[in-house]
Amino acid sequence: MKPDIVMKDIAAAVKSKAELSSVVCIYSNKREISQNPVCSFTLSIGLGKSKYLKNYEGSEPEISTEFKLCLLAPFGAGGKRVSEVALWISEAIRENLSVSSIEIQEPQYNETNASLFCDIKVTVEDISVADTACSVYIDDALVKNVVSFEIESEELLEKCPSLLNGYSYENTGKNGFFIKLQTRTALKLSDTFTLKLCFENSKEIYKECKVSHVTRELSKWGNLRFSYEIKAKEVCYE
């Protein structure tokens, strides 16, 4: 993923939070004029170093890019408030981007220009290959922050009573599909919807999808995952 796109995604993630709507986002590589004096929290977003780690065991190489963020506090804000806003920013980024690490430094004071600031370092995994390989759509809306996706075909069976032998199961002749979808953000799903997988030269369209179960998981690192178990009646290919 291109760094300029990631920086825009970071800014969009911050602005998506109501408690951060007043934060001004600027880019350190652009000729933008910041507030003087600073009247609101200002987040400067810049590009740091990139890392390429080759894996000799045959798997894909690890590629990551570091982004340097600097949160500048408005006049009158204290260190506690700066740390609180920095934490909100890190939570917003975690919820919307695939990040491998976020480091929040202690607030610092610059006596030269009498400014209070806090540095935030964000390391983002390179997921450009995964992004282009397959895209997931629900009712024609792109599903972002997909962690994993799995589809199984299943025979739809009917429960039939059998004299003296309890119950037996007979195949109805119809095929169904059991879908597992895990995302980093919660999805708003209707009772019945269409799920589409878009590849480079083909599409798989799963119709009459219904959610049968939803699981929310919180890792020890504080990352939230939403797992959806979905049943679909049929599929068509384009």
Image (cartoon, grey):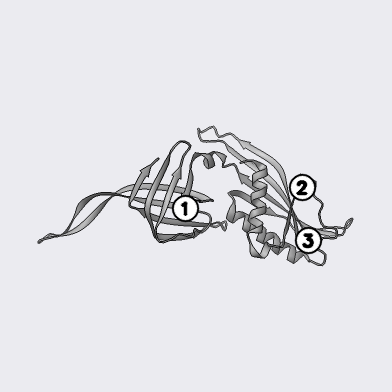
User: Along the horizontal axis of the image, is 196 left or right of 56?
Assistant: left
Amino acid at dot 3: Ala
Whichever of labels 1 and 3 marks the residue nearer the N terminus, that label is 3
Q: CA distance from mark 1 to mark 3?
A: 37 Å
Q: What is the crowding at mark 2: few (fewer than 14 residues within 10 Å), some, or many (at least 20)?
A: some
* Helix, strand or loop at mark 3: loop
Where is residue 64 drawn, in percent x and y?
A: 62, 41
Against 194, residue 48 (above or below) is above
Q: Quadrant of residue 81?
A: bottom right
Position of 153 compared to 41: left or right? left
The residue labelled by disc 3 is: 73
The mark closer to the camera, 1 or 2, is 2
Give the amino acid at mark 2. Ser
Residue at horizontal 66%, vertical 49%?
8
Residue in the image at 41% along x and 52% along y: 194
Pointer 1: what residue? Answer: 182
Residue 206 numbered mark, or none: none
C-alpha span from label 2 to label 3: 16 Å
Name the spot of residue 50 as percent of width and height, x first: 67, 39
Q: Is residue 8 above or below residue 78?
A: above
User: Residue 195's x, y, as percent?
Assistant: 42, 50
The local crowd at label 1, few if under 14, some if 14 to 19, many if 20 or more residues have their Cα within 10 Å, is many
Residue at figure coordinates x 48%, y 57% from the top left? 226
Q: Which residue is mark 2?
A: 28
Q: Quadrant of the N terminus?
A: top right
Q: Secondary structure at mark 2?
A: loop
Using the rendered view, name the quadrant where residue 94 is placed: bottom right
Residues 53 and 133: in front is 133
